[in-house]
Amino acid sequence: MSVATTDPAAGAPSLTDRAWKPDLENADKNEQLQQPQLEEKVAGGSIAMGELKHNKLGWKRLTICLIVEAIALGSLSLPSAFATLGMVAGVLMTVGIGLIAIWTSYLVGQVKLKHPHVEHYADAVALMWGKFGYELTSVMFVLVLILLTGSHVLTGTIAWVRIVNDPTLCALIWGLVSALLLYLLALPPTFHEFAILGYIDFASILVAIITTMISTGLVAAGFTPGGLATVSWSAWPPASITFTKAFLATTNIIFAYSFAMCQYSFMAEMHTPRDYVKSIWALGIIEIVVYTLTGAIIYAFVGSGVASPSILSAPTVVSRVTFGLALPVIFISGSINTTVVGKYIMGRVFPTSEIRYVNTRKGWALWLALIAGLTVIAWAVAEAIPFFNALLGLISSLFISGFTFYLPALFWFYILKQGRWDATYKNIGLTIVNGLVFLFGIVVLVCGTYASVWDIMQSYKTGKVGSSFTCSAASYGG
């Protein structure tokens, strides 16, 4: 097997040798084809039709895909993060990390524009570190997406247990139901088609958040002695806060901005990739507003005892109704992770075959089997790790720290920087900014992982977490 070479002029792996990395021939040229040009190629066969089918995504639907990827579990865990950090730190962290995420997402997109052949995150890392970087990032990419799907299986189980409210039923049933729904929703093979579900997803999470806000506010104002004035929220962290709790809360906020890792996968289907800037600004502003209001308002209404997910803090009946309203976002946002990793695997295994486009019987058969296998793995992960905050923190620390922070910062140093770091005032400023982003990502990786692992161990020692693959509804808040 041949080994990828490095082009000294470009400082990147040669695109002439694809033994270790999937790519279409002349991908740099084909990536920029517009719809009229692609239509002329349809007569060439199924591959050309597949390219046409997978080049329909505009910036508006890209925004929806990014919303589906990002705004789900994160928004439901933010009020508990605010309770740990305090109102002031919670707001500052939410806004600050959101702005950093917009910047790093901009860098991610710039790499795509400079190297149009990049289709997934691993392709971009390969520009810096060659085959090793590609393979390492591929493993990270697949693992994090499977874990994210698993976390949605867990949330789906919590939702069904709460909605049905029958502790005699084995909770494993609801895990299987959740896995089945995630499987069915992950079947659309293009993001242009998947984006249609995204509108339902976004409406679902907004309705769920607003319903939770209203119900918790009414309870605090009308049924608590002294009303809102007696709610135990604080502008500052509680005196009992520990390093591990603070970092676990921080990683929950970071998790809410985890859209950059799938950005290349989405942009690969764009007919005009440079329009991605509109999408990340739209998404970033929406996220910052939704997350800040969700975390601050629900924390102010419920106080230090706010649960995670925050829907559990609403009265029982309202909580059951709200979980029902949130079912679309739970399963649609979870299923897009399976779709992304499925498309990555299909593209890698069948780089020059029409099978990768899922437009033939064989392609569809393999796609159905692949999505089923990935969903089963995600279900197993969810049943083996039946807790919420610690899972979010571990995912954020191990993977999101790289995809969202230190890797985009390195993209600027290795790929995007023009000239020496001190050649211009602009370069000096960007060197400082990206250096700080890189350090922040490393701190999250190390300290956040430590805090998450410690929290998991303590939860098991104190009996706060049920056993793996348990039938007990009580382990899921039932």
Image (cartoon, rainbow, N blue to C red):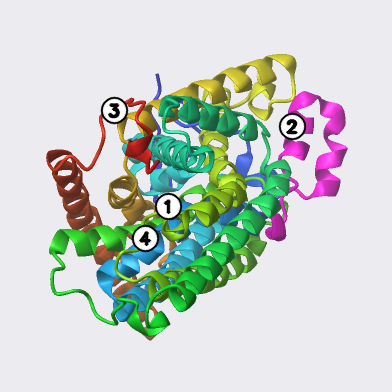
Image point (76%, 37%), residue name: 53
Q: Quadrant of the N terminus?
A: top left
Q: Is residue 414 visible?
A: no
Residue drawn where x is 42% and y is 59% of the image: 313
User: As shown in the figure, which amino acid type bears the numbered disc 3?
Assistant: Ser
Residue type at tag 2: Gly
First to last magenta residue range: 33-61
Q: Earlier in the sequence, mark 2 or mark 1?
A: 1
Name the residue beneath numbered marker 2: 50
Residue beneath disc 4: 254
Q: Quadrant of residue 224?
A: bottom left
Specify which label sits upstream in the sequence, 3 or 4: 4
Q: How dense is the environment of label 4, judged by Cα within 10 Å: few (below 14), some, or many (20 and up)?
A: many
**Secondary element at tag 2:** helix
Mark nearest the camera among 3 and 1 is 3
> Does residue 356 show up magenta in the picture?
no
Q: Is residue 76 visible?
A: yes
Secondary structure under the numbered disc 4 in the rendered image: helix
Q: Which residue is mark 1?
A: 9
83 or 171: nearer the viewer: 171
- Give the mark nearer the N terminus: 3 vs 1: 1
- Using a 10 Å C-alpha cutoff, classify the residue at mark 3 as few (fewer than 14 neighbours), some (14 to 19) or many (20 or more): some
